Image (cartoon, rainbow, N blue to C red):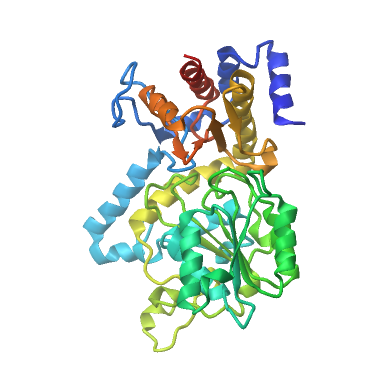
Amino acid sequence: MSHIKKLENISYKAALDVSTLDFAEHMDGCDELRKYRNEFVFPTLETLPRESVGDQSQNCIYLLGNSLGLKPKKADRYMQEAMDMWGKRGIYHHTSGRIPAAYADQPCKPLLTKIVGASDPSEVTIMNGLTVNLHLLMLAFYKPKGNKNKIMIEDHAFPSDRYAAKSLMRVLGVDESRIIIVKPRSGENLFRNNDIIQEITKEKDNLALVMLPGIQYYTGQKLDMESITKHANDLNIPIGWDLAHAVGNVQLDLHAWGADFAVWCSYKYLNSGAGAIGGAFLHTKHHGNVPSHLEGWWSNKQETRFEMRDVLDPAPGVDCFRLANPPPFLAALNLAALEMFEEVGMDKILKKQELLTGYLEFLLAVRLKDHLDILTPQNPQERGCQLSVVFRKDVSQIHGKLENHGVVCDTRGKVMRIAPVPFYNTYAEVYKFVDILTNILTS
């Protein structure tokens, strides 16, 4: 059953018009996740650095979890605990407390295992930032040899991916012209998964690495990670995924799919704060023979790390890619957010996501079809929270007026990105956002 049909069925049973605020408030009253909204801190109209109309004490309508998630209230407590442990115990903070400094990454590993679909905690770790992890894992898996030296990325890739791929090629003496950029068909905005698969087949003798996004940041399109990964595996081409916009947002099953590696940030849907610690995945098929890569002290097993050996005793799994002590303060923020995912489970998050983003899509299509186009796929299986919208008027002026009404979303070029997040956004907020947008576009 389509998400639109689900909404219509709910409205029929409740005897409410799906396009009304009454229906939105009914959905909020039935929401299994409604209590979690109170676990986050919302900016108010007063605290935002924008002039806005209305009651300044009211929460803003925050629809930008795709760029920076809101702060969990628990983050303050966990951060303060880590600070107190440092102050009160000094060096003994390394081995005691909720997040021992020397093992700061360990509490997060079992929680991430479920979120990304790893087989066990040895496949996941938290370390560094997204682009650092991307460099470390790409350097390990990109082994150019002769003409088999191409890297595949997507057109309009996020800048960090483009810069990382091209700079890696330069460092290894490979001409940038050997990069393959897969594009949507002429006149189309979205990728066809079969076209990506066919391009991999076409370049199978030249490809040394495929590196694609789980969700394309600009359009919000979710790629068919399972089928693309399987195809690359069948052709023995290493494949990695940038999950910046996918982790905590869509169903992931990295181990079962056979992905060689994946990396992500945690400040978007994982709500761990700006500059938050990133994460990485390494499939168990590589654990017995990890590709050559950069190493540091924390690449060593924690059991033998302080033996200070001349020769590295590699940590098991992806932990051997760690270079240095993960910061306990950033780990504290990450853990505070991950514990909510553990408590709720991705099934409930995705169930609400389908209906919440579907409701946004429905209202935009019904009320504003003559004013905008939605780039993001209609099929919920091909997207996450985000809808990318193109207007027939100047998007910067529209965005500015939305800000004046306390709406927080963003623009990238001609596109406005709007992302209602299941943990903390409501159906009523979605309704009010569309109401404000309608007034702006029709006045």
Position of 6 with respect to 217 (left or right) is right
Residue 231 is situated, as x and y percent measured from the top left of the image, at: 74, 63
Residue 206 is situated, as x and y percent measured from the top left of the image, at: 67, 74
Check the picture and name the quadrant holding the N terminus: top right
At 60% from the left and 35% from the top, the residue drawn is 353
> Looking at this rendering, what residue extends furthest in the front direction?
186
Residue 336 is situated, as x and y percent measured from the top left of the image, at: 43, 46
* Residue 338 shows in the view: yes
At 45% from the left and 76% from the top, the residue drawn is 171
* Residue 106 shows in the view: no
Residue 19 is situated, as x and y percent measured from the top left of the image, at: 62, 16
Position of 131 with respect to 200 (left or right) is left
At 71% from the left and 20% from the top, the residue drawn is 8
> Looking at this rendering, what residue extends furthest in the top direction?
15
User: 350 or 186, which is in the foreground?
Assistant: 186
Number of numbered discs:
0
Position of 318 with respect to 98 (left or right) is right
Vertical placement of residue 174 versus 430, above or below: below
Residue 77 lies in what quarter of the image? Answer: top left
